[in-house]
Amino acid sequence: MNPNKSTVFAAFLFSVLFVLLFISCQGDQASPINPKNVKNSIVAEAPVDRDYSDIKRDGVLRMITYYSSNTYFLHRGVEMGFEYELVKAFAEEHDLALEVVIIGPSENPYELLNRGVGDVIAANYAITPERREVVTFSRPYNMVNQILVFSAEMEEIPGSLEEVAERDVEIAVHRNSSYYHRLTELAAEGFSMRVSPLLADEGTEAVLLRVASGDLEATVADHNMFDAANRYIDGLIPGPVISEMDTISWAIRKNAEELELRMNQFMYKHFRFTEDPDRFRRSEFLNVIRKRYFEGSDEVMEYLNPEWNVDLMGRLSPYDELLRSAADSSELDWLLLTAIVAQESQFNPGAKSWAGAVGLMQVLPRFSDLSEEELFVPEVNVREGVRILRDHLEHYAYMDSTNQWAFALATYNAGHGHVSDARRLAMDLNRNPNEWEDVSDALLRLMQRRYYQDARHGFARGIETVRYVSEIKNRVRTYRSVLTSADQRY
């Protein structure tokens, strides 16, 4: 047994067995699929009118996804995941902040999309006829094979679909998945498979762990997801391929035509078909993130370790206790403080910027009575960072809480001088200097010579500050969503 795999698997097994106490009831009993009785169970209301222009006006793209190593996860507080990095690249290309909407227990991702809670489902979704009835799909960014996956606990592993059907192997899959759709097609072709519908909130990784532990006999997985999981988890045996070259795409609202166009343009740069049907042309960026998440990395291994799995343990970073304590003593939201640290240093206590800011909260020594060496100590740095943040909050205490926090964050990032310049410019433009929406627009204008040449503090990297405020607020919402989902699940 691979020592790395055995260590992670042994550590995770306890957590998996704990989870089984809660999810052992599958809802529907396992039974052969009768294709004549199968109807589309994907339900979604009519989509709201929210297209690219609306998203651009808000400045935020909302990504709907699951919490898993190939979609979105937190590694020591820092956001990661294949789907996350791909969607973030699209958002950055269009000067949009990215907010992640985690699909909670029993939540319908298609309803979240069509109600406008999110703008795109990025969750390794294959295109199926049932899904096409309620959403539109972008150009693809991957092609995968579906394979059966068996538990090594089985006495004899079936070698063919015929054997799977003859031996009445129980295959556990989600009812609305592309896997279930393919098993339905196989049933129509004469392969009578015994299928056990799973609870809607179990991700593919969680199902594979249950198969590895012997709780389930078999499941279906995309080959790339199996390959990634098999690097860290013992007890999985690959079986026959049941579907070849499934198209993986993002799902968007049917009436979001401009968003679809822009996403298709983005995808064309990163993934194209060639004359050879078995070969694809991928961009360097896409190859890099595919390798990172599907060919093995330390981050994915740590994600599969329950000590760092937020979904199981409710931990965001190595500094949760420190940040909770600092936030409580200063009457701050610890999630907001955590989001600031993630934005400033990605939880690296030894970080130092080009401008000389150091530590977890990137404190500038000239704004502290302490030495640079002292500011590298996490407890000291956080204490000083919180002190500076509190000063900014008190400076804007006359504002409502939403604007107060926005201005305090902007000042923490850009300094009082640039924020004051932006407020003066807002007044010159007959806008409200106490409304962040108006001042953020002025900050963007301070990147243009016609505006910054008359400003007291000159050119401002306005886009960085506006993104800083937006991304911290979005990260807080994401942290809260992840922790709430974990609480509801367990």
Image: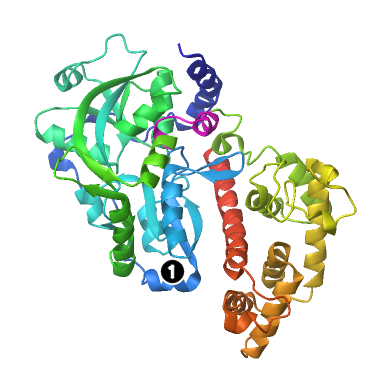
Say whether residue 306 is left or right of residue 332. left
Provide residue 2's location: percent of width, then percent of height: 46, 14
Decide if residue 171 is on the left or right side of residue 25: left
Q: Quadrant of the N terminus?
A: top left
Between 445 and 199, which is closer to the camera in this rendering? 445
Please name whichever residue, 284 or 386, is drawn nearer the observer in this view of the structure: 284
State yes or no: residue 295 in magenta. yes
Indicate the position of residue 311 as horizontal and vertical percent values: 54, 38
Say which amino acid is labelled 1: Ile
Question: Disc 1 marks which residue?
Answer: 55
The quadrant of the image that shows the C terminus is top right
Residue 249 drawn above or below residue 238: below
Query: Magenta stretch?
Result: 293-304
Residue 179 coordinates in the image, percent (x, y): 26, 37
Whether residue 50 is visible here, answered yes or no, is no
Q: Which residue is drawn at 61% across and 68% down?
A: 461
Residue 411 location, quadrant: bottom right
Tell me which residue sits at (60%, 76%) in the image: 437
